[in-house]
Amino acid sequence: MRREDLAALYHLPITDLVQRAQTVHRQHHTPDAVQLCTLLSIKTGACPEDCAYCPQSSQHATDVEAERLLDVEAVLAQAQRAKAGGATRFCMGAAWRTPARGPAFQRVLAMIRGVRALDLEACVTLGMLNDQEVEELKAAGLSAYNHNLDTSENFYNEIITTRTYRDRLETLRRVGASGISVCSGGIVGMGESDDDRIDLIFTLATLDPQPESVPINALVAVEGTPLANQPPVDPLVLVRMCALARLALPKARVRLSAGREVLSREAQVLCFMAGANSLFFGDQLLTTPNPDRNKDLALLRDAGMRALDSDGHAQALPPLAKERALPLWQQGPA
Ligand code: SF4
């Protein structure tokens, strides 16, 4: 798809855009099913990078307390809990510019092997990778590697100065060439223009192979970061981004990620209509809050959705942890 075609789609009336995205979605995916993923921070804070949105950067004064790399056992206990709760993919994030070498990296490999042994998909995000690291991650059985492009190449320098867009693309190229699935997406609400958003989706779509999953995040403006005062993004922008990702990357899982806590149930359902078919599930997303698991399950149930198993088949949703006292639509935003 050409860049100008994507731009024309982005600016369609939203009813037309969603209808087109839904048509493509139905050609490639089960329309009433979503993938449930859980994300755990395995090494928190003290990151040398300066990503303006991120409370884990050592260059911003935020409340995030740095934590060392977790033990394998602690991570696998969380993975087991995620699996019991219905997740099929377990994602682990470490606040590193590049992975620590030596025992720390070996520990991450042991986490990956352990998560795979639980019959969960394993995804990690560890920063920029060299060829050897990619090889070792692949040998450990890693299912997917997350490395977000975040925004357009043009806007990138406004958000991050400690690495380049080219660095980012290079890691994505290495991962893609290895056969590990690529997970890459971006963030809206950082002050970028519509053109930046279109450029981001266009760049993701031109990766070869295309990403297997595309997280679409809304900025969570955290105090102490340079973006703390950004106004909340219009939920319709997220709907447009989900639709555009669906149209440009028809086979990818489009994942509604950070920022979902402030979206209404209706806005989330509109994102599903637009082609989103994956969610982060669990109360915390690295260091920012995420909707309660029961609220998510109740939303999916009330919308008549099912969950995808690891083979991509639609199954009944996992049970709610406890009875809810009020109908969900009376409990405020998800
Ligand atoms: S987004 Fe990742 S690389 Fe950037 S500061 Fe945060 S932890 Fe570091």
Image: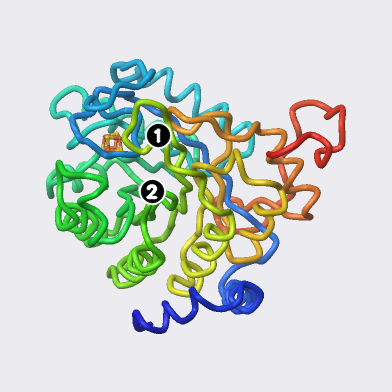
| Mark 2 element type | loop
Measuring from the top left, give residue 49's x and y in whole percent: 20, 35
Q: Amino acid at mark 2?
A: Met
Q: Position of residue 328 (x, y in %)?
A: 81, 38
Task: Examine the rendered structure and indicate whether residue 289 appears above or below residue 248.
Answer: above
325 to the left or right of 95: right
Q: Relative to residue 172, is residue 251 drawn left or right? A: right
Q: Residue at x 70, y 61 (%)?
A: 32
Crowd around label 2: few <14 · some 14–19 · many ≥20 (10 Å)? many
Element type at mark 1: loop
Name the image quarter holding the C terminus: top right
> Quarter holding the N terminus?
bottom left
Q: In the image, 77: left or right of 159? A: right
Q: Amino acid at mark 1?
A: Ala
The residue lying furthest to the right in this view is 326
Seen at 54% across and 28% down, the residue is 80
Q: Residue at x 53, y 57 (%)?
A: 238
Give residue 164's position: percent from left, percent from top: 15, 51
> On screen, 27 above or below 65?
below
State the residue in front, 207 or 230. 230
Q: Are marks 2 and 1 in contact (CB under 8 Å)?
A: no
Crowding around mark 1 (Cα neighbors within 10 Å: few <14, some 14 to 19, many 20+) is some
Which image quadrant for residue 201?
bottom left
The picture quadrant for ligand 1 comes to top left
Mark identifier at residue 228: 1
How far is mark 2 from mark 1, CA to CA? 10 Å
Residue 28 located left or right of residue 204: right
Of residue 16 and residue 168, the one placed in the foreground of this image is 16
**Residue beneath label 2, please?**
190
